[in-house]
Amino acid sequence: MAGLRIFSDFACPYCYLAKAMVEKTGKNLSFSTLWVPMELHPEIPSEGIALKDFYPGLDTAAFTRKINLKAAPFGIRFCETKRMVNSGRAIRAAEFARDADCFDSFHTAIFEALFTKNENIGDPAILRKIAAEQGLDPDAMDQAIDSHVYESRLRTAAIETAERNIRITPTFVVPGHPPFAGLPSEEKMLFILKQAAML
């Protein structure tokens, strides 16, 4: 089992920040990390839906300004996203990348596509483009996804998520310690990563 397990969804902007925080805060520590897929809203159609319909009253411009204040120290600039996307196919594409030993860069590329380029990661064409840019075979990726290769793996992740009663992304789990749900402060992140490094 990995020293640090992070339950995450590509549709969650705070998961993108969490990835950047882990990389920056943990650069001088030695620990293993496993990103566990947790699809929050599988009911969203592949074309997405307007955020204003999913979160009535949400001011997307104000949210973007707020999250960019958190993102600035990590060199990330969020665009103003106005659609809620379906992350299911992207999650499966990431499993293909994991098996090809390309998970980390593919993981980042998916987040960048959605949150900095405003691309719909529920669109198979967008995922094919990202796969090609990462040196992966888009046809092989589509075949694996459409053949349901990763469903057993994702069911196992869903069972773990339910057993741990995890409801929020990101959630950080270090064996032997209480889970931490949400985006931690840099100080708290360092504490979590030090716990992971002690395993």
Image (spheres, rainbow, N blue to C red):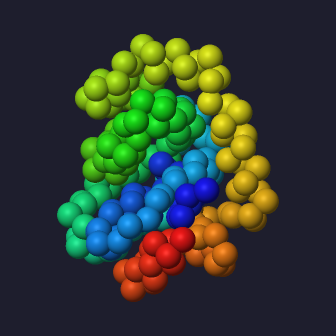
| Front position in the image: 72 or 187 | 187
Q: Position of residue 116 (x, y in %)?
A: 28, 50
94 vs 34: above or below: above
Residue 93 visible in the snapshot = no
> What's the residue at 51%, 35% (across, down)?
95
Give the camera-side residue of 117 and 147. Answer: 147
**Residue at position x 66%, y 75% in the image:** 176
Q: Quadrant of residue 69?
A: bottom left
Please tell me whether residue 116 is drawn above or below residue 43 in the rendered image: below
Taking the image as shown, residue 156 lies to the left or right of residue 45, namely: right
Depth order, front residue of 40/2: 2
Residue 132 can be seen, yes or no:
yes
Q: Position of residue 199 (x, y in %)?
A: 54, 71
Q: Residue at x 37, y 18 (%)?
A: 137
Image position of 190 (left or right of 96): left
User: Residue 76, position in %: x, y?
Assistant: 25, 61
Q: In which quarter of the view is residue 148 placed?
A: top right
- For the point 66% across and 39% down, the residue is 154
In the rendered image, the residue lying farthest to the left is: 75
Measured from the top left, where is residue 59 in percent x and y? 42, 66
Q: Is residue 109 above or below residue 93?
A: below
**Quadrant location, the N terminus:** bottom right
